[in-house]
Image (spheres, rainbow, N blue to C red):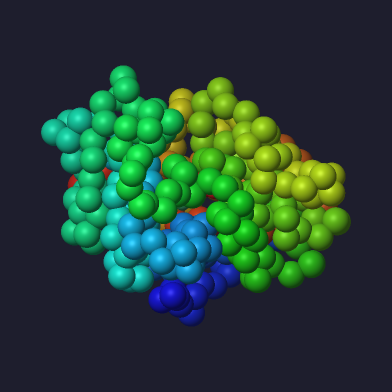
């Protein structure tokens, strides 16, 4: 299997007066630096699926996603790197939906099949379009045990001096992996980017009974109106943390995560002497859907 290099990943310490006054350390794990396209958590979540497909000698990966999906573009790229074919079942019609993300996925060789929003449903797509086909199926967002197993490897950068680890939650696969790898004294915090959605069930499905006893919790109030919604307040915050810390974030996941991390610190959620690792899970390509010059980075 062709591997992705992690050489560019680094830990960025964030200093500001409020954190210093409260005696809290904030470190950002810059997984966005892995690769401009297959960045952040996506390669971790895909690697064991890809390895499994290669081992089973299946030459085509099939998966699902929306028009701006980081998972779709990462799957397209990972398959290209590994000499596999890929098919993406995309929610919506082609015309209304041909985003920069999808064009890029297509350029990497992914075959796109558009399924109308009304009838988009994994089970029926599997029944109608995958039957008799020797596809290796990866669930939307890379959800599943192999995804969590790969995400657990993010802990390579997190030593036991960290008291809290905080990340964004889409399918809950990444946080599932982080919980698996965490030490008992560490608390894992998930920030949901979906409105009115409780990830607890999906996360628990990925954990053993013992792992379910570890310390983790979710916050559901930082979605800014829902998935991929980006009101002006959020854009202003993204510009501010770029100006203050040269920290680029994306509109779907990491801006909401950073906002939550600072807000929780402000509200004294973290006790004094906490050492917090914030996972920058990448996804910056999603900002390509914004009008030009919206962001300074
Ligand atoms: C996909 C993605 C997530 C969500 O990860 P899950 O494992 O689905 O919870 C978080 N951040 C970024 C940048 C992503 O692309």
User: Which residue is outermost to the left?
Assistant: 95
> For residue 296, which quarter of the picture?
bottom left
Q: Residue at x 62, y 29 (%)?
A: 198
- Which of 24 and 45 lies nearest the eye of the viewer? 45
The correct choice, above or below, for 265 with respect to 152 in the image is above
Q: Residue at x 41, y 66 (%)?
A: 57
In which quadrant will I find the C terminus? bottom left
User: Which residue is outermost to the top?
Assistant: 118
Give the side of residue 101 with respect to residue 155, left or right: left
In which quadrant will I find the N terminus? bottom left
How many numbered callouts?
A: 0
The correct choice, above or below, for 56 with respect to 250 in the image is below
> For residue 17, which quarter of the picture?
bottom right
Residue 22 appears in the figure: no
Estimate the x, y position of residue 163 in percent, counting from the top left: 78, 57
> For residue 149, which quarter of the picture?
bottom right
Estimate the x, y position of residue 262 in percent, counting from the top left: 62, 45
Residue 5 appears in the figure: yes
- Which of 87 and 276 lies nearest the eye of the viewer? 87
Q: Residue at x 71, y 40 (%)?
A: 204
Q: Residue at x 38, y 46 (%)?
A: 63
Estimate the x, y position of residue 45 in percent, counting from the top left: 52, 57
- Which of 103 and 229 lies nearest the eye of the viewer? 103
User: Which residue is outermost to the bottom?
Assistant: 7
Give the side of residue 29 with respect to residue 19, left or right: left
Estimate the x, y position of residue 100 in percent, counting from the top left: 21, 48
């Amino acid at each position: 299997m062709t591997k992705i290099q992690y050489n560019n990943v680094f830990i960025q310490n964030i200093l500001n007066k409020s954190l210093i006054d409260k005696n809290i350390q904030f470190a950002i794990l810059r997984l966005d630096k892995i690769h401009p396209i297959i960045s952040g958590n996506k390669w971790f979540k895909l690697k064991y699926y890809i390895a499994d497909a290669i081992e089973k000698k299946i030459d085509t990966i099939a998966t699902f996603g929306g028009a701006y999906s980081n998972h779709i573009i990462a799957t397209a790229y990972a398959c290209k790197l590994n000499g596999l074919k890929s098919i993406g079942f995309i929610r919506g019609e082609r015309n209304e939906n041909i985003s920069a993300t999808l064009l890029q996925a297509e350029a990497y060789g992914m075959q796109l099949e558009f399924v109308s929003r009304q009838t988009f449903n994994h089970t029926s797509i599997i029944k109608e379009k995958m039957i008799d086909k020797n596809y290796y199926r990866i669930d939307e967002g890379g959800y599943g045990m192999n995804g969590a197993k790969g995400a657990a490897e993010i802990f390579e950068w997190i030593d036991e001096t960290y008291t809290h680890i905080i990340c964004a939650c889409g399918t809950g696969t990444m946080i599932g992996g982080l919980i698996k790898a965490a030490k008992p004294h560490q608390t894992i915090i998930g920030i949901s980017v979906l409105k009115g959605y409780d990830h607890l069930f999906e996360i628990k499905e990925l954990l053993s009974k013992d792992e379910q006893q570890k310390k983790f919790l979710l916050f559901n109030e930082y979605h800014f109106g829902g998935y991929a919604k980006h009101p002006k307040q959020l854009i202003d915050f993204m510009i501010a943390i770029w100006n203050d810390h040269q920290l680029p974030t994306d509109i779907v996941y990491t801006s909401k995560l950073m906002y939550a991390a600072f807000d929780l610190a402000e509200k004294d959620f973290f006790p004094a002497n906490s050492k917090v690792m914030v996972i920058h899970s990448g996804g910056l390509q999603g900002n390509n859907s914004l009008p030009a010059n919206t962001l300074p980075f």
